[in-house]
Amino acid sequence: MSLLFLILFFSLVGGVLSVLLAALILLTPLTLRNRFLPHMVSFAIGALLGASFLGLLPHALIHPAVTDVHNITFAVLLGILGFFLLEKGVLWRHCHADDCEAHLPDAHGHGHHHAAHPAGTLILVGDAIHNLVDGVLIAAAFLTDEHLGIVTALAVIAHEIPQEVGDFAILLQSGYSRAKAIAFNILSSLTTVVGALLAYFTLQDTQAAIPYVLAVAAASFIYVAVADLIPGLHKRLEPAETLKQIVLIGLGVMVIYITHSTLH
């Protein structure tokens, strides 16, 4: 099986499958969705952190092109700061539950419809950029090691599903029909494949850039886990909920660890 086929397959799965699964979750009753999503988020945190610290960073640090590991750790630091600035610009949008600020009901019980269509358009543009970057990261991981590529794709899928559910909710509040919301989200998810193709044809000739792309991938996953996802878990302080969160985060890490170890 060719490397290009694997990259295209997993970038397509990472993009389109996430959208379809999110659409399926959106069709479930609200009470069931609100119970399921926080667990999905906890698992995604573990998968993202596991992929970063057990897969991406070790491969970046031992890459033959790296002469000074400080350059890699500096790239991770710059990556985290860069994603912070992107999110400040509302381009890197993550919204993982129906209680996110973008669609909280107001004092009269209504959602924030006043910024309807601009919010929906911004979500789609931000999602397309985000997916393009995900495609680059998946391709860079595959160009380093096929097993690392699979682990990276799994981490992308894990965190994309709850994000897409939040995106769907905003699009619906922005006046999109369910069919249009799904269609536009699938279109924006296809930029994952575009990013993967761009990376495949450019990074092969610039092998020295790959460890830095892996470092940025790790920064992306760490930022999403720590800045976007973990704060939401702190809203649920009950001991039983905290225990579930810890178990599911641990499960996410273990899935990445076992996948990486088994494939090797």
Image (cartoon, grey):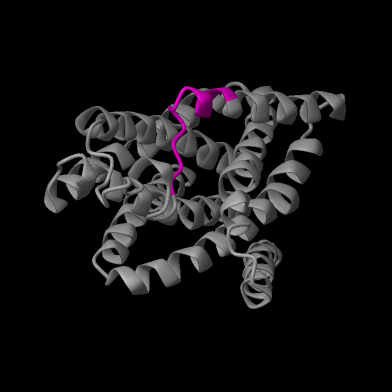
53 or 209: which is nearer to us?
53
**Magenta region, mostly helix, strand or loop?**
loop
Give the number of marks: 0
- Looking at this view, name the residue that lies furthest to the bottom: 240
- Image-based side of 208 in relation to 105, left or right: right
Placement of the C terminus among the 4 image quadrants: bottom right
Q: Is residue 92 magenta?
A: yes
Residue at point 87%, 25% (across, down): 68
Q: Is residue 96 left or right of residue 213?
A: left
* Residue 130 within the magenta-colored segment of the rendering: no
User: Which residue is found at the position 34% from the left and 72% from the top?
Assistant: 31
- Residue 27 rendering spot, x and y as whole percentages: 23, 66
Q: Which residues are magenta?
A: 85-95
Query: At 80% across and 37% down in the image, what residue appears?
Result: 61
The one of 100 and 68 positioned closer to us in this rendering: 100
Q: Is residue 216 above or below residue 243?
A: above
Q: Is residue 261 above or below residue 16?
A: below
Q: What is the quadrant of residue 167 in the picture?
A: top left
The answer to which image quadrant residue 137 occupies is top right
Tell me which corner region of the image, top left, top right, bottom left or bottom right, holds residue 59.
top right
- Residue at 20 percent of width and 39 percent of height: 174
Q: Position of residue 107 (x, y in %)?
A: 32, 47
Horizontal side, residue 69 vs residue 36: left or right: right
200 and 126: which is toward the camera? 126
| Above or below: residue 187 compared with residue 91 | below
Residue 221 x, y percent position in the rendering? 61, 43
Q: Residue 81: percent from the left, percent from the top?
A: 66, 25
